[in-house]
C-alpha cells in the first residue's frame, strides 16, 4: 500500500523516496518505450510520470483512440516491466506545450460549452464522459490492485488559471467514483496565489519550479505543513518557440538544483527526463505577455527539452551529471545506459514528384461552406490544417489596404489568383493598397493553424479569421474549404495530375531507400515552411526560414527495409523556398 504522511511516502510500510522522471508516451513511439524507460532507470530514477492528453484520445466527440502511440494501457504495462513506479496526470487539462493544453478543439464548436476549466455544465458533461472511458484504463494499474501507479493528479497547475475549487472537487470525486483509489494530488507554482487557487484540502499538494528549491519548499510548508515535500516538475531544461533562440540549461546548474532538492529530503519528478517529439500537429503555443498585447509564440516540433535523455534516447552530459546526483539514493547498483538505435548513413533523396495544393483540393478538401463571415476552423469541424477562404471585393473603387482581423495563425493572401503577401498573427495583419478592377476582385486567404495556446487566459482559442476588411468595409459572403493535416493525410494525392497551377503550396514526394530501419535527422535544404510525412506518419511542422529547429527527428520504427515514401508540403512555394531533396543527417540541428 502506498501512503503519504508528514514524514514522507511509504510503500508497504517502508519509506520510499520518489525519484521520478517525466516521459510522455504520446511523444515517443511505442516500439521505443521500453528503451527509454530503461534509460530512466539507468539515470537513477525509480518512477516515471506521464500526462494523458484528452484530445489525442478523443479526436471527435464520442470517438476514442487507445491504440498505437495512444495505447496508455500498453505504456503502463511497459513502465511496470521496466521496474518503475508510475505517476499519472490524467487531464482534462495538461498544459505540456500540447495543442490546447490537451483539451479537445471540438469543445469550442459546442455551443453548450461556455467556459473551460470550471463548473460550466456543458464542459463538465464532456469531462465526465471522458473520465468514464479513461478511468477503466488507469484503474487496473493502480498499486491498490497489484499495479505500479502510486498516485494520480487532479487537473494541472490550476492555481495558474482559476479559482473554482469546486471544479477541482468535481474532478477528484469523479476519479474516485470511477475506481481511482490511490492518493490524489495537485501541482502548482510555489507562490501563495498559485497554491491557494490550485490545492485541495486533504489532497497532497506539490510544487513546480526550476530553481531556488529551498524557497519553493518553504512556501509550500507554510501553507501545507502536513504535506511531505515533492517537486512535481523540476524544469531541468525548456522548450522552444519558432522564431526564438534555442533554450539550453547548463548541466552543472541543473544537477546542483537536483542535488539541493534531494538534499532537503524531498521527492522529485524531473520534467522532462526524456522529452521526445511533438509529432504531427500536436505542438501547442504560448502567448508571451498579455499585458503587452499577447504575442503568439507557436512551439517547435522537437520536444527535446534539453532533457538528460535526448530526443533520440541518447545519453547527454546532463544525464551523467544527474546520474551522479541520483546514484547515492538508489536501492542498489544502477544498470548501465543502453545506446539508442543505430543511425542511417547520411543519404539524400530527391523530391522528384510535385503537386500543387490548389490542384489537389478536390481530393483533399471538405465540402464548401458558405457564410456571411469567414467560419472558424472549429465551426468547419477542423482540428488542424488549412482553410481556404474565398470572397469578393466589389468594384470599382480606389486601392485600399486589405486587413484581416483575428488571424490565427498565418495566411497566404491571393487577389485574383496572384500572391499578394503572407500575413502573420500579431504582425502586420494587412496587405497595403489592393487595386480593384471595375468588375471587382476575388480574394483568397489560405490560413494555417500552428498550434493552440496551451497555457494561461488565452486558452480555448479558435483558428481561422474573424473578418476581412477592405479599407473600413467588412467583406461579406465567404466560401470556406477545410484541408485537414495530420497523420494519414495527405493519403490520396494524385501525383502528376491536376491542371498545373503555378501558385500556392506544393506537395513534393521522394523515396528513401534504406537497408535496415534506423534513426535519422531529416533536413530539407532550400525549404521554407511546411509539414513532412514518412510512410504516411506526420513527423510534424518545419520552418527552416525561421528556426531555431532545422532538422526533424525521424524515429526508426517509421521506416522499413527498402523503399520509404517521404511527402513534404511546402507552404511558402510562392516565395521560392522549395526543397529539392531530403537529407538524412547524423546530428540534430535544434538551433
Ligand atoms: C508547467 C506545466 C507543464 C509544462 C511546463 C513547461 O509547469 O505544468 O505542463 O507546460 O510548465 O514546460
Image (cartoon, helix red, strand yellow):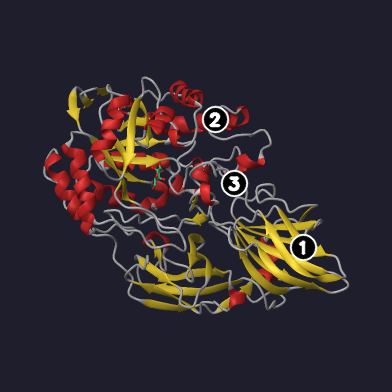
Is residue 223 shown above or below 427? above
Q: CA distance from mark 3 to mark 1?
A: 25 Å
Is residue 513 shown above or below 232? below
Q: Secondary structure at mark 1?
A: strand
Classify residue 432 as left or right of residue 218.
Answer: right
* Residue 541 drawn at (x, y percent): 50, 62
Residue bearing mark 2: 118
Residue at position x 63%, y 74% from top?
Answer: 355
Using the rendered image of the protein, determine whether residue 362 is visible from the camera's viewpoint: no
Q: Secondary structure at mark 2?
A: loop
Q: Quadrant of the N terminus?
A: top left
In primary-sequence order, the first of circles 2 and 1 is 2
Residue 547 figure quarter = bottom left
Is disc 1 surrounded by few (<14), some (14 to 19) or many (20+) residues within 10 Å? Answer: some
Q: Which mark is residue 470?
A: 1
In this rendered view, identify the residue nearer to me: 341 or 584: 584
In this rendered view, identify the residue nearer to me: 279 or 240: 240
Tag nearer the camera, 3 or 1: 1
Residue at position x 56%, y 44% from top?
Answer: 59
Q: Is mark 1 within 8 Å of ligand 1?
A: no
In primary-sequence order, the first of circles 3 and 1 is 3
Is disc 2 surrounded by few (<14), some (14 to 19) or many (20+) residues within 10 Å? Answer: some
Residue bearing mark 3: 461
Q: How many marks?
A: 3
Residue closest to the far front: 292
Tag nearer the camera, 2 or 1: 1
Is residue 26 shown above or below 586? above
Quadrant of the rendered image holding ligand 1: top left
* Residue 387 drawn at (x, y percent): 67, 58
Is disc 3 surrounded by few (<14), some (14 to 19) or many (20+) residues within 10 Å? Answer: some
Amino acid at each position: 500500500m502506498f501512503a503519504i504522511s508528514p514524514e514522507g511516502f511509504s510503500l508497504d510500510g517502508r519509506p520510499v523516496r520518489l525519484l521520478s522522471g517525466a516521459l510522455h508516451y504520446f511523444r515517443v513511439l511505442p516500439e521505443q518505450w521500453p528503451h527509454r524507460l530503461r534509460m530512466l532507470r539507468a539515470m537513477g530514477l525509480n518512477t516515471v510520470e506521464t500526462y494523458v492528453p484528452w484530445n489525442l484520445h478523443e479526436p471527435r466527440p464520442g470517438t476514442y483512440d487507445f491504440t498505437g502511440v495512444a495505447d496508455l494501457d500498453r505504456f503502463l504495462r511497459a513502465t511496470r516491466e521496466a521496474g518503475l513506479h508510475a505517476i499519472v496526470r490524467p487531464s482534462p487539462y495538461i498544459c505540456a506545450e500540447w495543442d490546447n493544453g490537451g483539451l479537445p478543439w471540438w469543445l469550442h464548436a459546442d455551443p453548450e460549452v461556455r467556459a473551460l476549466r470550471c463548473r460550466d455544465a456543458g464542459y463538465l458533461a464532456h469531462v465526465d464522459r471522458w473520465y468514464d472511458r479513461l478511468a477503466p484504463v488507469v484503474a487496473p494499474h493502480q498499486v491498490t490492485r497489484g499495479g505500479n501507479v502510486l498516485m494520480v493528479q487532479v487537473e494541472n497547475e490550476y492555481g495558474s488559471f482559476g479559482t473554482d475549487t469546486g471544479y477541482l472537487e468535481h474532478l477528484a470525486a469523479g476519479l474516485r467514483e470511477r475506481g481511482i483509489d490511490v492518493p490524489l494530488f495537485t501541482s502548482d507554482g510555489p507562490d501563495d496565489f498559485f497554491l491557494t487557487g490550485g490545492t485541495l484540502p486533504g489532497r497532497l499538494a506539490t510544487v513546480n519550479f526550476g530553481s531556488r528549491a529551498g524557497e519553493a519548499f518553504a512556501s509550500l510548508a507554510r501553507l501545507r505543513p502536513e504535506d511531505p515535500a515533492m517537486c512535481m516538475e523540476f524544469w531541468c531544461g525548456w522548450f522552444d518557440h519558432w522564431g526564438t533562440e534555442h533554450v539550453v540549461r547548463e548541466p552543472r546548474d541543473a544537477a546542483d538544483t537536483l542535488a539541493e532538492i534531494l538534499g532537503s529530503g524531498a521527492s522529485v519528478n524531473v520534467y522532462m527526463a526524456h522529452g521526445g517529439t511533438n509529432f504531427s500537429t500536436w505542438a501547442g503555443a504560448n502567448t508571451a505577455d498579455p499585458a503587452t498585447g499577447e504575442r503568439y509564440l507557436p512551439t517547435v516540433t522537437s520536444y527535446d527539452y534539453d532533457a538528460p535523455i535526448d530526443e533520440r534516447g541518447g545519453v547527454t552530459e546532463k544525464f551523467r551529471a544527474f546520474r551522479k546526483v541520483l546514484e547515492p539514493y538508489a536501492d542498489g547498483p544502477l544498470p548501465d545506459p543502453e545506446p539508442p538505435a543505430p543511425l542511417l548513413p547520411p543519404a539524400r533523396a530527391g523530391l522528384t514528384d510535385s503537386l500543387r495544393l490548389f490542384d489537389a483540393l478536390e481530393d483533399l478538401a471538405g465540402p464548401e461552406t458558405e457564410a456571411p463571415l469567414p467560419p472558424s476552423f472549429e465551426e468547419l469541424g477542423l482540428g488542424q490544417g488549412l482553410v481556404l477562404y474565398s470572397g469578393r471585393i466589389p468594384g470599382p473603387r480606389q486601392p485600399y489596404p486589405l486587413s484581416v482581423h483575428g488571424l490565427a495563425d498565418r495566411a497566404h493572401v491571393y487577389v485574383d489568383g496572384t500572391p499578394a503577401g503572407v500575413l502573420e498573427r500579431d504582425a502586420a495583419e494587412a496587405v497595403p493598397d489592393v487595386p480593384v478592377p471595375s468588375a471587382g476582385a476575388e480574394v483568397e486567404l489560405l490560413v494555417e493553424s500552428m498550434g493552440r495556446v496551451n497555457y494561461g487566459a488565452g486558452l480555448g482559442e479558435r483558428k481561422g479569421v474573424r473578418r476581412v476588411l477592405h479599407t473600413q468595409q467588412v467583406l461579406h459572403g465567404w466560401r470556406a474549404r477545410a484541408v485537414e493535416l495530420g497523420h494519414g493525410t495527405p493519403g490520396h494525392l494524385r501525383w502528376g495530375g491536376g491542371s498545373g497551377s503555378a501558385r500556392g503550396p506544393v506537395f513534393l514526394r521522394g523515396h528513401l531507400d534504406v537497408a535496415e530501419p534506423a534513426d535519422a535527422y531529416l533536413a530539407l535544404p532550400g525549404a521554407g515552411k511546411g509539414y513532412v510525412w514518412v510512410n504516411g506518419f506526420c513527423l510534424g511542422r518545419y520552418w527552416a526560414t525561421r528556426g531555431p529547429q532545422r532538422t526533424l527527428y525521424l524515429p526508426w520504427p517509421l521506416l522499413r527495409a527498402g523503399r520509404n515514401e517521404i511527402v513534404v508540403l511546402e507552404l511558402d512555394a510562392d516565395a521560392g523556398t522549395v526543397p529539392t531533396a531530403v537529407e538524412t543527417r547524423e546530428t540534430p540541428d535544434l538551433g
